[in-house]
Amino acid sequence: MPSEKVLEQKKQIVADLTEQLKNSVAGVVVDYKGVNVADDTKLRKELREAGVHYSVVKNTLLGLAAKNAGLDDICSVLEGTTAIAISPEDHTAAARILSKFADSHKNFSVKSGYLDGAVIDTATIDSLAKLPTREVLLATVCNAFNAPIASFARAIQAIVDKSGEAPAEEAPAEA
């Protein structure tokens, strides 16, 4: 039986992890075996810059936290080496970064994930990974709204250019 101090530490880890899972919009669970320190450091830096919390966790502790957060279905993939990337704001950042990393590292693999409180499979994670960033999507929407206005301005300019002369100004009246 573990000591009282160790048991309290584990309870605190589960409580903290449960809170993170509940207060996030997305997360991805990965098998990180075979990743060297240099690659892991680069991955962690990229995730940190994107606002994603990445940590290696014990399967039993993550399983307890997932159950507490209502993500029971994620427990089926909790075996072997496990790390979780939790994104509090961006729905696609963790999936995009970890899927790209998994493509270039043969032993690193995506196990499962969740999105807005629902467990998702690897196919959905791959789809999320292919979505452009939030900034790119917002720029696309802005361009779509701006296009009719720009077309109208070009049409007016074409009419002015076709007439061959600029609108005449009124000459001041002489007394």
Image: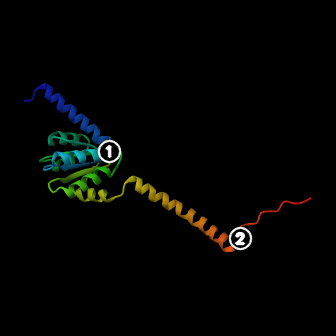
Quadrant housing residue 87: top left
Q: How many marks?
A: 2
Q: From the viewer's perspective, is the residue at label 2 or at label 1 nearer?
A: 2
- Identify the amino acid type marked 2: Glu
* Colour setup of the view: rainbow
Picture coordinates of residue 57, whole percent (x, y):
18, 41
> Which disc number belongs to residue 49?
1
Closer-to-camera residue (73/55): 55
Work out how far the residue at label 2 is from the one at label 1, CA to CA, in angstroms.
Answer: 55 Å
Circle 1 — which element? Answer: helix
Badge 2 element: loop
The residue indicated by pointer 2 is: 165
Whether residue 149 can be seen here = yes
Q: Position of residue 173 (x, y in %)?
A: 87, 60
Identified at 24% across, 34% down, the residue is 15
Q: Residue at x 13, y 25 (%)?
A: 4
